[in-house]
Image: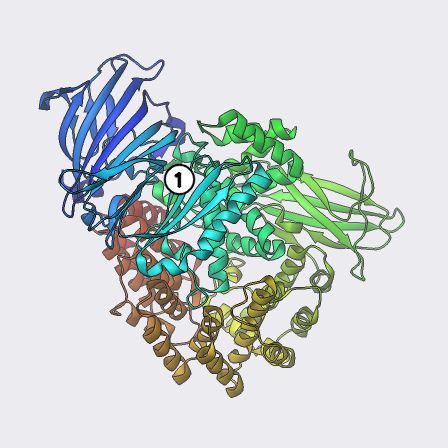
């Protein structure tokens, strides 16, 4: 069967319920790679052992794809063609006893591997990406996460072409062969699953550092990059050192090898990969200098480097039993990197940023055709489940455990988890059991979060009894939108609340029946475990203002009928930074939705003065830093506004938000100009005050340029021309492109001329145009898809243009003409032939077709049907498109 025919066959879903332990174990792996320009040879020696209880006649079935088999031998005896079976998916060896040595030799062609899965070429480099099932494209193996083995790897290559040869673990030998080729031998003393294998070879340079663990053991650190990028690695090295120290202090986790390496590559399907001791990174999350990276880039690099480092314990030392348990490592490690960033930057800004990502991406996912629980029950292609649900909602679920257990209980649970399961492949239930035992809490009901599909709704109402001096807060959990109530389990929700007086002062909370006792606090975590519960607070003299879901203590939507006045009080006085921001966003959301309704009805638009007044108080509030002010001043995104509608009013929302931007700018013109005319910020400074100041100035500039006044446009032009750093230059360019006309064209040309040789910076050029609100954005994106610098096969470039446009530019992607849909469908079809993983991630926005009006639905469905009709469609894209079409 040829490849297109194999792809077109409808695959059978893989079910979590069908998991069975592997019938064989592989204790040790010895690999030898002989790198070549055309063909690379891989010799493997596997020490195989039949698992306890496995049938004596069970054959060994090894996964393998795209391999040319040269040799097979068992215990040194070569096997003839009739003694094994091989096809495009597997190598099968008949029963050979309880323990034996299997030798195979295969050849592969990394330069032809455009899927970027397994061993492939990126520029002049060899590199690997084996998660989730890429190792089978390197050699025949039991390519599943519950098979953990110790590896020894020898890499042989031409030193003139590939002078640096890297793999997992510690270097144990190196030298030169008689034919002049170099070799390096690596050994990883810790057992690991095959998805954590890594190999990198090429002409690289490293910035080296060192770290001494708290027990006094030295560790060498190396950041490997292509020679021209060596000067952009200092921040990555410092970020790694910071993450190592933090993990020791917060979780008691020391690094366990003599060497820790990070390699930056140009072509990578993901952000980074935590391979044991040798992290392979998308260059986007390693390279930085003030001239090429923004403040947000610097923080993202630090966060991603920390995330991959933290995987050493939560993912590597303890890994997943099967891929359904992916959130076990990813949700937990996302939470750990969130806590790290909160500790090292601003906890309030980090929390707001995390919730924005969740609400924008994950809440939308919950309402789409690919909705799934954080632990899915089935999949066709595992690559499709590296999702916001598994990662971001998974982190929120574990954050709720932390809230319920308290900081001390959570740490005890984590310590117990490491103690019980080090060196094992385990499940989400194993993690939850360790948390329950370590924290001393029953988490049985809480476990339903792992199987809940959709975003639950938290309803609330309050009643004040003046005579009794009580306030009753009634909380109710309701099923996710569009879900049958019978399918919604009763969850265990931690709901953090506070009460404020009419003057904004926090009230002490005396909760009736509180078993803990003690002095009243101003924030309490209420545990909602029934469909509805009443919580009675004593000693409340007047109707309070309720601060609900402080810190976003549960990943839910809220239905709570609060007045605009109450929201304004919370915006101005709530001591919980998230709740204050959220109140402002809810106030703005209400105003914008009313404006959208007016626009749809053809009524004149007028801004509610309460919104402008509230934002003015934010600007002058000395208690808020610049980053928090910038977040509070940013109006809700059109995508978030659309989530409040049964049918997204694309045009009305865009008209409403555009009007509101200009109206707020006009109302706050004076304070906004004061921000811009304030003391200049040295662009070389990267301390918190400087970053906060730049973020606030960027928002002020965007508002003023939205008015279209010549003075503001000229200020943006001057800032762009004079900027010495990327943060100021990019923020000005965004404003100019949104404004359009000659100022935009001049700035875009200058930016392109300066940075066309730097791929990561040029990605910014594409994205800024892709997300522009200017009326000509669609035409510009269509033209950019044929630009000489656009490369569909480079994942970063494809995401920079197509991903940004389809996922972040709701108005222009959903233009009534349908050309945005056609563009995305055309590009997905073209890319699916080479890189199904990236194609599948790009096609997602078309799957939300049921959320839009009938005309747009028809055009989106037609685009999906055209993708579905492509002969040989990959499993990756086929699963997403098939589920999207079935949802209708």
Q: Secondary structure at mark 1?
A: loop
- How was the colour assigned to the protein in this rendering? rainbow
Q: Is residue 568 above or below residue 711?
A: above
What residue lies at 66% left-to-right and 28% top-to-bottom? 440
Q: From the viewer's perspective, is residue 428 above or below residue 630?
A: above
Which quadrant does the N terminus fall into? top left
174 or 458, which lies in front? 174
Residue 682 falls in image quadrant: bottom right
Residue 317, how many percent across, how many down? 45, 32
| Residue 401 in which image quadrant | top right
Q: Is residue 280 left or right of residue 574?
A: left
Q: Residue at x 50, y 51 (%)?
A: 363
Determine which quarter of the picture holds residue 528: top right
Q: Nearer the viewer, residue 102 or 673?
A: 102
Task: Please indicate whether residue 424 sits to the left or right of residue 704 in the image.
Answer: left
Q: Residue at x 21, y 33 (%)?
A: 89
- Res 597 visible: no
Residue 211 locus on image (x, y percent)? 49, 44
Left of 29 or right of it: where is 659? right
The percent position of residue 471, horizontal first and vertical second, equals: 80, 48
Total numbered badges shown on the rendered structure: 1
Residue furthest right as drawn: 467
The answer, for residue 344, to whether it is visible in the render is yes
Against 725, residue 320 (above or below) is above
Furthest-bottom residue in this view = 710
Image location (x, y in percent) of residue 378 = 38, 36
**Which residue position holds label 1?**
277
The one nearer the camera, 821 or 756, is 756
């Amino acid at each position: 069967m040829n490849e297109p025919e194999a792809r077109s066959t409808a695959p059978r879903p893989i079910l979590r319920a069908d998991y069975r332990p592997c019938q064989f174990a592989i204790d040790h792996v010895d690999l030898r790679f002989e790198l070549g320009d055309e063909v690379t040879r891989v010799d493997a020696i596997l020490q195989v052992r039949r698992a306890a209880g496995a049938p004596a006649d069970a054959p060994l079935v090894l996964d393998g794809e795209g391999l040319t088999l040269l040799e097979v031998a068992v215990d040194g005896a070569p096997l003839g063609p009739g003694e094994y079976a091989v096809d495009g998916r597997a190598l099968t060896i008949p029963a050979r006893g309880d323990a034996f040595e299997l030798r195979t030799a295969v050849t592969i062609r990394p330069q032809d591997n455009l899927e970027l899965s397994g061993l492939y070429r990126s520029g002049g480099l060899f590199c690997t990406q084996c998660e989730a099932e890429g190792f089978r494209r390197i050699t025949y193996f039991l390519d599943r996460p519950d098979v953990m083995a110790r590896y020894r790897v020898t890499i042989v290559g031409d030193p003139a072409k590939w002078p640096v040869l890297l793999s997992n673990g510690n270097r144990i030998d190196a030298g030169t062969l008689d034919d002049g080729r170099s070799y390096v031998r690596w050994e990883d003393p810790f057992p690991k699953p095959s998805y954590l294998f890594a190999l990198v070879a090429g002409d690289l340079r490293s910035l080296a550092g060192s770290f001494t663990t708290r027990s006094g053991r030295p560790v060498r650190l190396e950041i490997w990059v292509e020679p021209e990028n060596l000067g952009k690695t200092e921040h990555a090295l410092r970020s790694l050192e910071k993450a190592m120290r933090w993990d020791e202090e917060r979780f008691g986790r020391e690094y366990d090898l003599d060497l820790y390496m990070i390699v930056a590559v140009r072509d990578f399907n993901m952000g980074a990969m935590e391979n044991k001791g040798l992290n392979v990174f998308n260059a986007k999350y390693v390279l930085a200098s003030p001239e090429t990276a923004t403040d947000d880039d610097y923080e993202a690099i630090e966060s991603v480097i920390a995330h991959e480092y933290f995987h050493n314990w939560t993912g590597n030392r303890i890994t997943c039993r099967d891929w359904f348990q992916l959130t076990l490592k990813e949700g937990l490690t996302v939470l750990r990197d969130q806590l790290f960033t909160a500790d090292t930057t601003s906890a309030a800004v980090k929390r707001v940023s995390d919730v924005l990502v969740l609400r924008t991406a994950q809440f939308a996912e919950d309402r789409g055709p690919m909705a799934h629980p954080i632990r899915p029950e089935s999949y066709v292609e595992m690559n499709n489940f590296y999702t916001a649900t598994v990662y971001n909602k998974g982190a929120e679920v574990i954050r709720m455990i932390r809230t319920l257990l308290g900081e001390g209980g959570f740490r005890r649970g984590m310590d117990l988890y490491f103690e019980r399961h080090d060196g094992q492949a385990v499940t989400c239930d194993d993690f939850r059991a360790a948390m329950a035992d370590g924290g001393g809490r029953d988490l049985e009901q809480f476990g339903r979060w792992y199987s809940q599909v959709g975003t639950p709704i938290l309803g609330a109402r309050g009643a004040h009894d003046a005579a009794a001096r009580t306030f009753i807060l009634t909380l109710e959990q309701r099923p996710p939108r569009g879900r049958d109530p019978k399918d919604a389990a009763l969850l265990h929700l931690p709901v953090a609340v506070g009460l404020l007086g009419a003057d904004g002062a926090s009230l002490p909370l005396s909760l009736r029946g509180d078993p803990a006792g003690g002095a009243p606090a101003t924030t309490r975590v209420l545990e909602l475990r029934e469909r509805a519960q009443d919580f009675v607070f004593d000693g409340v003299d007047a109707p309070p203002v309720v601060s609900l879901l402080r810190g976003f203590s549960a990943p839910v939507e809220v239905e709570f009928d609060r007045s605009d006045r109450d929201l304004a009080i919370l915006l101005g006085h709530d001591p919980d930074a998230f709740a204050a921001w959220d109140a402002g966003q809810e106030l703005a959301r209400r105003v914008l939705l009313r404006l959208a309704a007016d626009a749809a009805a053809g009524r004149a638009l007028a801004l509610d003065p309460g919104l402008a007044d509230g934002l003015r108080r934010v600007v002058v509030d000395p208690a808020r830093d610049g980053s928090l002010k910038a977040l509070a001043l940013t109006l809700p995104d059109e995508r978030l506004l659309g989530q409040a509608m049964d049918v997204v009013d694309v045009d009305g929302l865009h008209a409403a938000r555009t009007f509101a931007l200009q109206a707020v700018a006009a109302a706050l013109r004076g304070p906004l100009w004061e921000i811009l005319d304030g003391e200049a910020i040295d662009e070389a400074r990267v301390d918190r005050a400087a970053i906060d100041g730049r973020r606030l100035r960027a928002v002020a500039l965007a508002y003023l340029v939205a008015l279209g006044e010549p003075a503001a446009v000229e200020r943006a032009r001057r800032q762009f021309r004079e900027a010495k750093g990327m943060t100021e230059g990019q923020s000005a360019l965004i404003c100019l492109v949104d404004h359009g006309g000659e100022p935009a064209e001049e700035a875009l040309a200058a930016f392109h001329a300066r940075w066309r040789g730097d791929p990561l910076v040029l990605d910014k050029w594409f994205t800024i145009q892709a997300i522009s609100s200017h009326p000509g954005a669609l035409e510009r994106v269509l033209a950019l898809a044929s630009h000489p610098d656009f490369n569909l096969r480079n994942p970063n470039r494809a995401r920079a243009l197509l991903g940004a446009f389809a996922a972040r530019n709701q108005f222009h992607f959903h233009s009534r003409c349908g050309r945005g849909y056609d563009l995305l469908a055309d590009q997905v079809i073209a890319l699916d032939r080479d890189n199904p993983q990236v194609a599948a991630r790009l096609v997602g926005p078309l799957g939300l077709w049921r959320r839009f009006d009938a005309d747009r639905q028809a055009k989106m469905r037609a685009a999906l049907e055209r993708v579905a009709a492509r002969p040989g469609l990959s499993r990756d894209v086929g699963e997403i498109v098939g589920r999207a079409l079935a949802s209708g």
